[in-house]
Image (cartoon, rainbow, N blue to C red):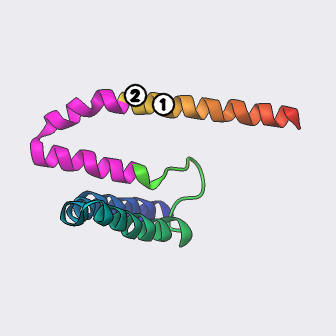
């Protein structure tokens, strides 16, 4: 059940970011963008992390995955599947960056454990 709540929480965060943030920054400029960021990300972070809705076992996935997925799928629903196909090179490089970050983190942890 916890994983279902994680999916719902990140989906809600993605929908708010993709629909409200642009409207706030468009209407009120930089200040509106900052306010929307504080309001949306702050409240969604509180719900997903502090209240314990977010998963704490296994692979840890941040709200950014839900927000990114919502943004990608919004583009696909509005403009067709070609938007998703055009995003594949970017997603590939994001995956490569995640893998390199994970490998670097493990190497750093091993180095730190050896030093102690």
In the rendered structure, does residue 69 fall within the stretch colored magenta?
yes
Q: Please state the extent of the stretch shown in magenta in the rendering.
A: 65-91
Q: Between residues 51 and 2, which one lies in front from this camera angle?
A: 51
**From what the image shows, is residue 108 above or below residue 58?**
above
**Extreme left residue here?**
79
Q: Which quadrant of the view contains residue 76?
A: top left
In this image, 12 relative to 83: left or right? right
**Left or right: 78 with respect to 55?**
left
Which residue shows up at 15% across the image and 37% down it? 81
In the figure, residue 7 lies in which quadrant? bottom left
Q: Is residue 51 magenta?
A: no
Q: Which residue is label 2 attached to? A: 93
- Locate residue 86, reporting x and y percent: 21, 30
Circles 2 and 1 in contact, beta carbons < 8 Å: yes
Number of the label disc, if any, that sits on residue 97? 1
Dot 2 falls on a residue whose secondary structure is helix
* Residue at image point 47% right, 65% down: 45
Locate residue 85, reporting x and y percent: 21, 31
Tell me the quadrant of the picture where the C terminus can be found: top right
Work out whether 103 lies above or below 49.
above
Determine whether the residue tagged by mark 1 lies in a helix, strand or loop: helix
In this picture, residue 39 sits left or right of residue 16: right
């Amino acid at each position: 059940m916890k994983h279902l709540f994680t999916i719902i929480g990140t989906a809600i965060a993605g929908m708010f970011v993709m629909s409200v943030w642009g409207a706030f920054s468009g209407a009120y400029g930089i200040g509106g963008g900052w306010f929307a960021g504080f309001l949306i990300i702050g409240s969604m972070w509180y719900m997903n992390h502090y209240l314990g809705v977010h998963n704490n076992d296994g692979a840890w996935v941040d709200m950014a995955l839900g927000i990114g997925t919502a943004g990608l799928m919004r583009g696909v629903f509005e403009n067709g599947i070609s938007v998703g196909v055009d995003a594949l090179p970017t997603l590939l490089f994001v995956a490569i960056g995640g893998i390199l970050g994970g490998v670097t983190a493990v190497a750093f942890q091993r180095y730190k454990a050896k030093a102690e």
